[in-house]
Image: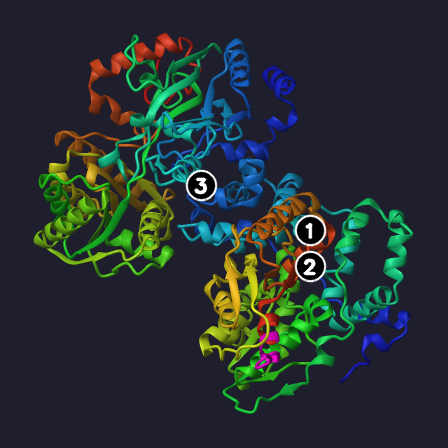
Amino acid sequence: MDPLVSDLLALLGKERVLFEPEHLAVYGFDGTAALSGATSCVVFPETAEEVSQVLKRAHAAKRAVVTRGSGTGLSGGSIPLNGSLVLCLARMNRVLELDPKNLTIEVEPGVTTITVAELADKEGLLYPPDPGSMKISTIGGNVAENSGGLRGLKYGITRDYVMGLEVVLANGERVQLGNKCVKDVAGYSMKDVFIGSEGTLGVITKILLKLVPKPQAKKTLLATFSRMDAAAETVSAIIAEKIIPCTLEFLDKITIGCVEDFAKIGLPLDAEAILLMETDGHPAVVAEEAAKMEEVARRCGAVNVQIAATAEESVKLASARRAAFSALARVAPTTILEDATVPRSELARMVNFIQGVGERYNLRIGTFGHMGDGNLHPTFLTDEKNTEEMHRVEAAMKEIFDFAIELGGTITGEHGVGLAKKSFLPGAIGNASLHLMKQLKKTLDPETLLNPGKIFDLP
Amino acid sequence: MSKTPLTELPPQAVIERIGRDAPQGRAARPFYLKELDYSVVQQCMHCGMCLPTCPTYDTTKLERNSPRGRIALMRRIADGDLEVTETFAKEMYFCLGCLACETACPAGVKYATLFEYARADIEHSGVLNNPQRDLIRQLTLKTLFTNPNLLRFVGRLLWIYQATGMQDLVRSLGLTRLLPKKMREMEPLTPTVNDQFSDALIRPVETPPAKRYRVGLLTGCVQDLIYSDVNRDTADVLLANGCEVVTPRSQYCCGSLHAHNGELEAARDMARRTIDSFDLGALDAVITNAAGCGSHLKTYGHLLHDDPAYAARAAEWDRKIKDIHQWLSEIGITPPRPGVEPQKVTYHEACHLCHGQKITAQPREVLRAIPGLELVELPESTWCCGSAGIYNITQPEMSQQLLKRKLEQVDATGAPVVATANPGCLVQIVSGLRASGRDVEAIHPISLLARAYREEGQE
């Protein structure tokens, strides 16, 4: 037996070390389509000390380690390459403290996002980041990928809610970063280095999150359009009116069909696009903003604007929207999801461009996304077994990324680089920026043992 | 030619008859997973939306114990990268088959089909074969549950054992200790057999005064032995709603036990026999009151699509087969007039009703039609109770964990009555209630409705 495996067995016991082929096979992938790898061993530490011990052993054996939560990532970030050890934190899921006086909650990384959201809700508080997979994604994964969600435009993203972290470094050393203070400028903000680092700089073992008061009121509107760019124009116009709704979600015709097929909530199947709009806050402000948003949508060409009658109906609409990506799999064997993001003023151009690319390359693309923050999810509906079509997908994807960058945008708004977007990173950020990232990586993980081959390659 | 009922034959003749009536061995065939249309496994894009709804994953947090993990293994088998191994087989029998993942899956993966194919391949491969298991399967699936007269005969013996006080005597003397461990643990689960079976309680044709429809009634196999009173109640409810009820005397097992346990050929045979029991053309609907059967009965069209002699009738069957709650909702329930006591009732959703048949609103509609009945929603009402066909026998540990969780939720409602529409769930919940000394009644919703009709107008 692999000496590292027997060492880990001695450390964690046989219940928490997996190495049978039927176990390993199912840790070779995450939520990313058409990408997979292979691991030699999966371990389930339950404390930071155990994480540290595992990393020390892996370090001594010069073996790579990839950290994993629920495996719902969308850029291949938790896919093990070349037999890397998988460090799964799903069982490290204790809620450590909810502090209503300081509006914080401290949890272990394996706690699911929805658990945090529900605990906050019980206290009359809100944890705003709500990625599509929030029912199962872990907070550790959210922090490592710096996840976004449907409320990004008003409330920001995961980074905006992380106040402190405990991190285990590549050599097994444990460090505490940040605290409950709203203001803290004692040295570099090191926690920010680890947020969004995709498991390449350290393993996050404890997270202190900021909560905000729950808004008193909320209104959900559904606007129907007969043209895609009219929806995009509506978004730009709402922002230009100085309204920041909490949600402005866009679904195109293909996506509407798939989501309706799954959720059966009566979405307009003949529409070219819909916008799901939500405003929250003080009841008076909510009423005013909702009226204004309806007016703007109609002015921009919405054929219908509907207001959700009950809170239940709003929740149904939002949950249906969260299912959009997976629902697209109803119409194609392989769904390749992209994450191009542009400044909001450029949305209409981007949407039209994606449509054009689909036509030029003869590809089906379903587009949906968080239009309010410029974050689109054009999704290629294809078949990974069709090599010729997959080449066209790659070429089309490159054009979309290039155009997004040309518009002052980025290749990924919230899914991360991982494996999927590694080749596009240099073009997106430039050599100087990439060099700085590599310097940082070399400092914190000199032997490239933490999630190697993700974000960028090191020689 | 009519045969002497088994109950009237001497034991030796019974054994000879069984041998003759058992279905013949099936022809050699390739493995289902390998010949399957590949797009069925490809449909799963491993997004992970199923994970939080899977009771086994929720307990272990191991990918292999999750729907997408199991599908990944099946895909490996389909790809030829993995053989049907004993570990795979055990995994597929660790799955409850509750189908919560199907409800959660935005991509619309047909897990039920994959699950049946996987178990059929496992039985075909023989990786789990051992003399004890083979004997039990031969006696139960292939003999007892293919022969309704024999089943009633065994049921009669069990009734004598229970009704004469022998069971109590055996239990109080501690004689159950003489049983092998597994059987000893199962013994308290033994349901009480009714003194009369369905054919004694329901006449071949019963006609209401104002006849609106003519329906066939499925009395089931296990249901017929231990819940023949529920069958009588179903007939009463149908009569009260203007349906003439046609009940074939001796009915075969619908084949769900076979399909769910890797005997698809036997399941096809049982489907043919069940279809033959009814004169479909003369009926508006065929009614089932057992969720587990209903879920399977609705797949006859698919099961027999390539059988030229049966395909057309199986398709007609699919159009006419209705769960009792579904049927009542379609024809409009005639509400009972107010009767005696107001009551508080909670409702546990049988997996094969809510996930297997997507019937969730109709049973509630049935319960709400009862005057004075207050329906208290059960938290986690769609979470499996651990019965899952014969799962409580094959996987007692997981089954008991789920039962405990279910009963705690029932406690939380404070309702003295829990209604559920499946004999398996009823047996499981009743045994749990009994073992823990809880003073709660478990009952089929239709029995509550039948009771309300009987108590109409009583003050």
Chain letter for the residue marked with disc 2 in the picture: B
The residue range painted magenta reads B451-459
Where's the N terminus of chain B, which quadrant?
A: bottom right
Q: Which residue is mark 2?
A: B427
Q: Is residue B152 left or right of residue A146?
A: right
Q: CA distance from mark 3 to mark 2?
A: 32 Å
Residue A134: % across, % down = 39, 39
Q: Which residue is mark 1?
A: B392
Residue B379 painted magenta: no
Q: CA distance from mark 1 to mark 3?
A: 27 Å
Q: What's the residue at 28%, 37% (across, down)? A: A338
Residue B452 painted magenta: yes
Where's the C terminus of chain B, which quadrant?
A: bottom right
Q: Is disc 2 in the same subunit as disc 1?
A: yes
Residue A390: % across, % down = 31, 40
Q: What's the residue at 48%, 53% (across, down)? A: B102
- The amino acid type, in three-letter code, at marker 3 is Gly
The residue closer to the viewer here, A247 or A406, is A247
Q: Is residue A204 left or right of residue B391?
A: left
Label 1 neighbour load within 10 Å: few <14, some 14-19, many 20+: many
Label 3 neighbour load within 10 Å: few <14, some 14-19, many 20+: many
Residue A371: % across, % down = 20, 41
Q: Secondary structure at mark 1?
A: helix
Q: Secondary structure at mark 3?
A: loop
Q: Is residue A287 left or right of residue A334?
A: left
Dots 1, 3 in contact, CB < 8 A: no
Q: Which residue is mark 3?
A: B48
